[in-house]
Amino acid sequence: MTRSRFSLLGLLTDIRVLQIIGQVIFLILVVLAISGLLDQIFSALAARNLTPNFTFLQNRAGFEIAGATNYTPDASFGQAFLVGLGNTLSVIIIGLVLTTILGILVGIFLLSRNWLVRTISRVFVEILRNTPLLVQIIIVFFFVLALPPSNASITLPQEGIFLLPLRYAGYLAVLVVGWQITRGLAAEDWRSAITFPLIISAIIRIELGFSVGSDPVTVEMVSVPYLAVLVILAGLMIAFWRTPTLRFAFIGVLIGQGLGLILLNANVIPAAAARFELQPLFYLNNRGFYFPVLQTTARFGLWALFVVVGIVVAVAILVYFARLKAETGKSAPSLFYPFVSGIG
């Protein structure tokens, strides 16, 4: 008798037994609560002569679902439920794939030697990891509510007309030509040291000539940009005047710029501009984020095949000639590459 009492007290004082008893009691309470709730629901439905069933799933839905291909408003609620379930699963699968890729990239960025990339990744990880998910959901929720309605969406870029002066293309061409010239010169060559300063000085003077030709000359315009350019040109003249070659080059640049300004102000070279019409590509509002969908044409497969074949041929040619140069020490002629690519 004494042993049985001690064994019963041992079971009642065992923490594992108490946890099991507590879980059983909690389960019984949950079952009782659910059964009482269902009893009240069925009683209320019976008082109104309503029978709970799923026949309403066969009724006409009467609404549209965005992104559904084989669904129309004439479909049933059951079909609408299946379409919504499929959309949810597709969003979950795409989200899992994208979050996995993002997590791998951020993990790689955390190991980067670049301080900026490593710090941004660290801040991104710490904010998302140390912030409760509920707080993130609330912030996103209020951010979405703060967005404008669909009829006043935020568009990127804004609609409008963009005028690009054609002389900018000339500036870019001159800079590219100057870069090509200086690339073939030695670092200590005087021409590589003055090419870009002279090109930039010419561009500044031409733009100042445009501003003078289009806007009335004011004291502020003369005092700020023109005096700065005059000081720069005077310094260049003093620096270059001791060397005859540089002196004549500088004089030639000044004469060319002066003639160019005269032609521009005389409208011999008009300030033409290319007209571009901008249309929004992205729409952001409180109903979602809309972006253009890429549509493939009938020849997309053939084009993709040519792209893949071209990449394979280019890689094969690169590997072959790299091995040939490593074995013989000689490079193939420049015209030989396009010839082999054309045959391939």
Image (cartoon, rainbow, N blue to C red):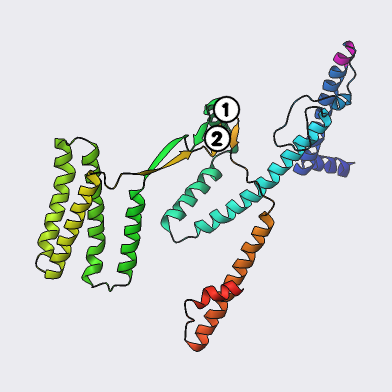
**Is 219 positioned to the left or the right of 185 in the image?**
left
Image spot of residue 220 (x, y percent) = 16, 37
Q: Give the residue displayed 62% in from the left and 69% down from the top.
A: 312
Q: Give the residue displayed 19% in from the left and 35% down from the top.
A: 216
The secondary structure that dominates the magenta segment is helix
The answer to whether any part of residue 149 appears in the image is no
Q: Give the residue displayed 23% in from the left and 54% down from the top.
A: 202
Front residue of 114 and 261: 261
**Is 153 positioned to the left or the right of 271 in the image?**
right
Find out whether residue 44 is within the magenta segment: yes
Precedes in sequence: disc 1 or disc 2: 1
- Quadrant that contains the C terminus: bottom right
Q: Which residue is mark 1?
A: 150
The answer to whether any part of residue 247 appears in the image is yes
Q: Amino acid at mark 1?
A: Ser
The relative height of residue 194 versus residue 19 in the rendered view (above or below) is: below
Front residue of 102 and 107: 102
State the SS at label 2: strand
The relative height of residue 183 versus residue 88 in the rendered view (above or below) is: below
Instruction: Find the magenta span and give its range.
Output: 43-47
| Residues marked 1 and 2 touching at CB (< 8 Å) | yes
Callout 2 crowding tier (Cα within 10 Å): few <14, some 14–19, many ≥20 = some
Image spot of residue 337 (x, y percent) = 52, 75
Marks 1 and 2, how far apart at CA: 9 Å
**Is 47 positioned to the left or the right of 222 in the image?**
right
Q: Which residue is mark 2?
A: 283
Q: Amino acid at mark 2?
A: Tyr
Find out whether residue 173 is within the magenta segment: no
Image spot of residue 125 (x, y percent) = 52, 48
